Image: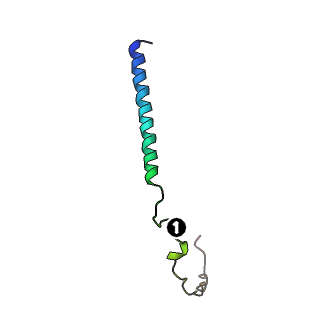
Amino acid sequence: MSGRHAIRLAIVAAAVALTAALTILLNLTLLGYAQPRNDPVGRLSPRASLLPAPASKPAPAPRPAPEGEADD
């Protein structure tokens, strides 16, 4: 392994490590902004937005089958 090859490999390894560290730091920063605050979102009752159920209707009567041969 030549000296130039070792230097190039060290630079690539340092770039990969720096990219990984910056990605982790950015994710942790964004997670910090996503922490819950005093917003009411997530604490609402699911029943708060439901409308009252409509009056029940009888089911429609089934229609009789047509007479004659089947088309199958």
Name the residue at 54% across, 72% down. Answer: 46
Name the quadrant of the N terminus.
top left
Question: Residue 31 appears at what percent x and percent y?
Answer: 46, 50
The way the protein has been coloured in the rendering is rainbow
> Residue sitting at 61 percent across and 77 percent down?
69
Q: In this view, does 72 lie above or below 64?
A: above
Residue that protrudes farthest toward the top in the picture: 2
Nearer to me, 14 or 38: 38
12 left or right of 61? left
Count residues near mark 1 (Cα–Cα under 10 Å), then give few for <14, some for 14-19, many for 20+: few
The residue under label 1 is which amino acid type? Arg
**Which residue is found at the position 39% from the left and 24% from the top?**
11
Query: What residue is at 43 percent from the left and 40 percent from the top?
Result: 23
Residue holding disc 1: 43
Nearer the observer, 55 or 36: 36
Q: Position of residue 26 (x, y in %)?
A: 42, 44
User: Which quarter of the figure has residue 3?
Assistant: top left
Q: Which of 48 and 32 is in front in this view?
A: 32
Circle 1 SS class: loop
Question: In the rendering, at what x and y percent does residue 30 appear?
Answer: 43, 49
Q: Quadrant of the C terminus?
A: bottom right
Q: In this view, does 69 lie to the left or right of 30?
A: right
46 over 58 or under it: above or below: above
Residue 39 location, quadrant: bottom left
Please tell me how many numbered marks the rendered image carries: 1
Report whether 60 appears left or right of 39: right
Q: Position of residue 20 (x, y in %)?
A: 45, 36
Considering only vertical position in the picture, is 47 above or below 6? below
